[in-house]
Image (cartoon, rainbow, N blue to C red):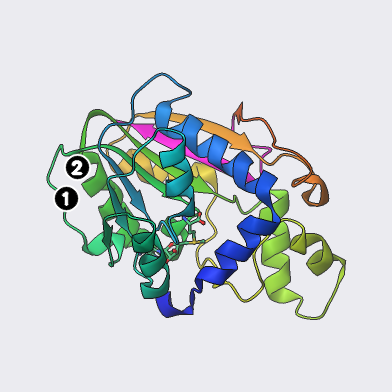
Amino acid sequence: MTDAFRHEYFDDFERDHPNIFASKLKLLETAITLDGARETGYTVSVGAGTGSYEAALRADGFEVDRIIEPSANLAAEARARGFDVTEAFAQDVPFEDSSIDTMFYNGSAFGFIDEATLCDLFSAHYRQLKPGGVLALLDVPPASALGLAVQASFLITQESYISEVLRSSWYSADTPHKEYWRTTDEYRALLESGGFTRLLTWQTLRRHLIYQNESVEPVVQGYQEGSYVALVAVK
Ligand SMILES: C[S@@+](CC[C@H](N)C(=O)[O-])C[C@H]1O[C@@H](n2cnc3c(N)ncnc32)[C@H](O)[C@@H]1O
């Protein structure tokens, strides 16, 4: 799976959709700071891809100390951006207990992980976070406008209005498919089984897909409207 990722899929999309990138970045910053209420401290990004969001975070004053990224192509790109990158699956990386202030998965790396593994992983993350630490999961929910269009595109392979609309807000059709499409409520339950009790949500990209790149969208609380949602667990 991992070598199927090419950095161009992300670079090309982000260059052509700067406002979508900026909206998602704002959601990520809201999630990891709890909307400006905390410092991010020692920060780990899981499934960081090319490290483009991490570089944008650094430009905004939020340092990412370590990246976990299993794709060799994408890890090389993140390394070239100056990050400390461990080329591995999240479930294979041991961290010391109570050693991390902030951990985030931007862009659904957890959607490539089966449920039993994810249960163990979220329990491990609970232990690895310091008290007050934050685990942020950012995802395209399956019932959101974008989630439905992406899933429909897997089933409808010929050119259609869905593929036309999807090109305005999604990556190349060749980008590897997220395997597990779970709702935010399902992730909430998995996090609770891992030990988390305080959970918060924010969302963005609430417009129809064809308008999402017209300007940067605001971040609002909740998870039932946006095509990009942050589910944030606080230890
Ligand atoms: C859709 S990409 C998102 C990349 C980047 N974070 C972004 O938002 O543009 C999903 C990423 O998850 C990574 N990934 C897949 N399975 C993973 C796992 N088990 N542990 C960590 N990362 C994983 C992939 O290699 C890929 O970089």
Q: Residue at x 28, y 67 (%)?
A: 87
In the rendered structure, the answer to whether residue 75 lies left or right of residue 166 reads left
Q: Which quadrant would residue 40 be assigned to in this image?
A: top left
Magenta residues, as a range?
Answer: 222-235
Q: Label 1: which residue?
A: 95
Q: The residue under label 1 is which amino acid type?
A: Phe
Query: What secondary structure is marked by label 1?
Result: loop
Tell whether 54 sits left or right of 88.
Answer: right
Crowding at label 2, few (<14), some or many (≥20) Cα neighbours within 10 Å?
many
In contact (CB < 8 Å): disc 1 and disc 2: yes
The question of residue 200 being in magenta is answered with no
Looking at the rendered structure, the kind of residue marked 2 is Gln
Residue drawn where x is 43% and y is 35% of the image: 232
At a point 45% along the width and 61% down the height, the residue shown is: 50
Q: Residue furthest top?
A: 37
Q: CA distance from mark 1 to mark 2?
A: 6 Å
Camera-side residue of 100 and 52: 52
Whether the residue under disc 2 has CB within 8 Å of ligand 1: no
Q: Nearer the viewer, residue 154 or 171?
A: 171
Residue 202 horizontal/vertical position (percent): 55, 32
Q: Is residue 142 above or below residue 126?
A: below
Find disc 2 in the rendering and name its residue. 128
Q: Is 95 located above or below residue 155 in the figure?
A: above
Give the number of the disc on residue 109: none
Q: Is residue 230 shown in magenta?
A: yes
Describe the element under mark 2 as helix, strand or loop. helix
Q: Nearer the viewer, residue 49 or 2?
A: 49
Q: Quadrant of the N terminus?
A: bottom left
Crowdedness of circle 1 by 10 Å Cα count: few (<14), some, many (20+)?
Answer: few
Q: Is residue 167 visible?
A: yes
Dividing the picture into quarters, in which one does residue 67 lie? bottom left
Q: Residue at x 77, y 51 (%)?
A: 209
